[in-house]
Image (tube, rainbow, N blue to C red):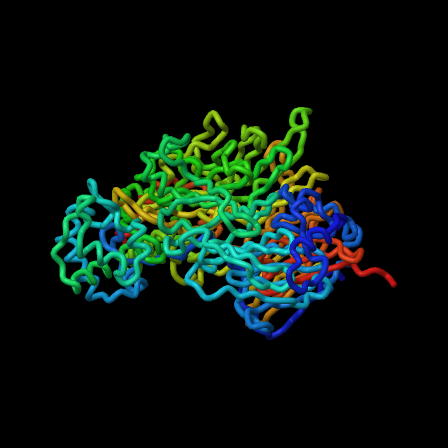
Amino acid sequence: MKTPRFLLLAAFATAPMLLGQALKPSDLLKLPTDSWPTYNGDYSGRRFSPLTQINSSNVHTLSLAWATRFAPGGGGRGGVQIKSTPLMVNGILYFTSPNHVWAADARTGRELWHYQYPPNTGSTIGNRGVGMYGNWLYFESPDSHLISLDARTGNPRWKVEIADPKLDYTSTVAPVVVGNHIIAGIGGDHLDNPGFLQSRDPETGALQWKWWTTPRKGEPGIETWPDEYSAAHGTGQAWIPGTYDPELNLYIVGTGNPNPVMAEKSRKGDNLYTCSIVAINPDTGKMVWYFQPSPHDTHDWDAVETPVLIDGVIDGQPRKLVAQASRNGYYFLLDRATGRRIVSTPYIETVNWAKGFDAKGQPIPDPAKFPAVDGVLVSPSSNGATNWQAPSFDPDTGLLYVGTSRSYSMYYLTDTDDRPEGWGGLDQGVGDGGNALLAIDYRTGKTVWRHDWPSGSGVTHMLTTAGKLLFTGNGQNLIAFDPANGKILWHAGLMAAPSAGAITYLLDGKQYLLVAAADGLYAFTVNQAR
Amino acid sequence: MLFRKLTTLLFVPAVFSLIGQEPTFGGAARGGVNAAANATAAALAGSKEDPAAVERGSKLYASNCAGCHGVTGRGGAGAPDLVRSVLVLDDEKGILIAPVLRNGRPDQGMPKPQLSEAQIADIVAWMHVQTYAAGHRGTYAFLDVVTGDPKKGETYFNATCQSCHSEAGDLKGIASRYEPFALQSRWLQPRGGRGGGRGGRGGPASPRSVVTVTVTLRSGESFSGPLERIDDFGVSLRDSSGEYHSFFREGATPKVEVHDPLKAHLDLLGKYTDADIHNVTAYLVTLK
């Protein structure tokens, strides 16, 4: 990094330290090549790297530099699933699984430290990683605490409760650092508890602001609920890190499903701001605009998928845009200053739950496809046309790459009480019309090319680079495509399916491709002739 | 050569099934009794409360509390929902609930109940089962799926399904082998849990649903049998003698033809109306 790090280090130096590990918040404003300092690599959510050392001409020589497995006890297979996108800052990798944080040498894969959070009753479904500010890391625990660690040692500095774990909240989000704000979402939709996003002070963990994902009495949007009570129990968790536009000073993030999840009787209305894309001022916690991909959702289609920031051209005019391939099967392109819709269109052909679009370009849900006691057949399934797995946007091709499934489920209502609670229903997968990697024209939402997978999940992570490469996974394979046409250029079979988005960075002049798969990290480089 | 044949006797488990996409939170459903009014047996077991105490608590709740808080504990006129109550959710072994049941909340209109400590403990146990049941999808029970018209279902069946299935043949007595919900799940997707979603599985796959593959080499030599594994880079199968064959793939070489006997079921997913589904189920449940 080119910024005078020593100033920052001097400010934080209180203990013996490894030099050169700190990350200035202002570093996050650049498009990095020598680091991967935040969940999506940069604030845009594009997961696009300008690096070209690994490129379409030499990718066939891409080979393993190192592979390391991580376990709570050190060594061996411990059931670890690394669903976090690792950070790489100054030669050190930071990554997580529920209750665990590791640091490893990015040159060798050697474990530097391992932090284990005490046993607790929170859900261990996944953890998306850490946020970094100076020498401090931020990590969410299954029982909804925010823990700050010293990145040099893994020693905890403090922890604060960010949601009541007894109310069935559980937290998986990688906190996002914006200026001096640690923005933390939470998860958990089992028991109709309020949803919120919050910002914490990086030094003390003190609450800076809390934004409720559903309105309170007298607030705009309360008219989309029958009453204050149903809104206050309407959930809408923001469980995936959002993106940030520094010029507009907007943190753009998706929110999850309303509660009760599949039993809608007691929450008639659009149920704002659940299943929404919202733009929040990170300094005040105030919402600036919203767009709702799934008004009155009844199918668990969290609209949390990364809202990707695109500086594009529409009708000859340069525009600041945000795109989302949403879990409900629709692609949305919005003006990111206003939230106004430019494109709304399905990206899988099997979608069958909407009756067209409202004036804002939001799908109108068909009541005939609300879950019913005897079942209704809906595409996609509750797992969605896509899910939390990271998409990627390549500015060179103008294509958004999304892992998809044309899934169907029967959706059953199981709670017929006038006051349903929790999920109130279930869906049962009944097959799919195939799983595919889609390359979507951001301007139209139309698929330019597709790759249908012969087997395995289609909902996988994406990474693109200026080396004219698209990396993704299928089954246990890590695969490189030509992003322009979908031709497969390279693959490697790993010991497990890639479990988080691949990252890339330059270290000592060498470009690395790094991916997590179950309990392992795999680093690849192009070998140079000697 | 772009590919090379590998022959081995190693056993390789089939991995054709979908690798599950991650649900956001939670688990799968299993059958049981009606969930609307009573927590299921699964919820009782999962809550780890004493069944006898819960049974006593259920009766005590009905006679002492249900009048205001509703028969399911979800609130009534002027009385709060107990299942969503933060006090109940935060409670452990009655530490928070018991004082309320001992003293009532006269300031909020809740009279003081006349309950012994043992009775209070029983009601607390019952309440914890209710919150557990609401919050754990794995304990939910599916309800009645037989709502369709069996005559219309028979007509649909004769027009659409008869080329592969018959009332007198493979489906003879099918309604005696499966409960209605399992039957609906099974006929929609006979391969069981394939595909997304969270619900219960439809049971083990039928031998008739086995996916087979034919691999034809450039030489014209071909191999056929149940598919073991396929991706963009390889395909493997086990032939009729039980021998395992594995092949590299590169683009269209070798030629690979996958035959899924259940493709017709998948193709129909885009064609059924919900009424078709309910009618066919109503017809099939008559095939005792």
The residue at 54%/61% (across/down) is A97
As drawn, is B193 to the left or to the right of A460?
left
Task: Relative to A405, say whether B228 is above or below.
Answer: below
Classify residue A410 as left or right of residue B288.
right
Q: Quadrant of residue A378?
A: top left
User: Residue, x 60% and y 73% (percent of image)?
Assistant: A75
Q: Position of residue B45 (x, y in %)?
A: 29, 64
Could you tell me if residue B18 is visible in this image? no
Q: Is residue A58 or residue A159 the one in the foreground?
A: A159
Judged from this view, the residue extending furthest toward the bottom is: B9
Q: From where the camera sits, is residue A11 visible?
A: yes
Q: Which picture quadrant has residue B140?
A: bottom left
Residue B185 x/y as whole percent: 37, 53
Q: Nearer the viewer, residue B172 or B32?
A: B32
Residue found 28% across the figure and 52% down from its top: B285
Taking A386 as reference, is A12 left or right?
right
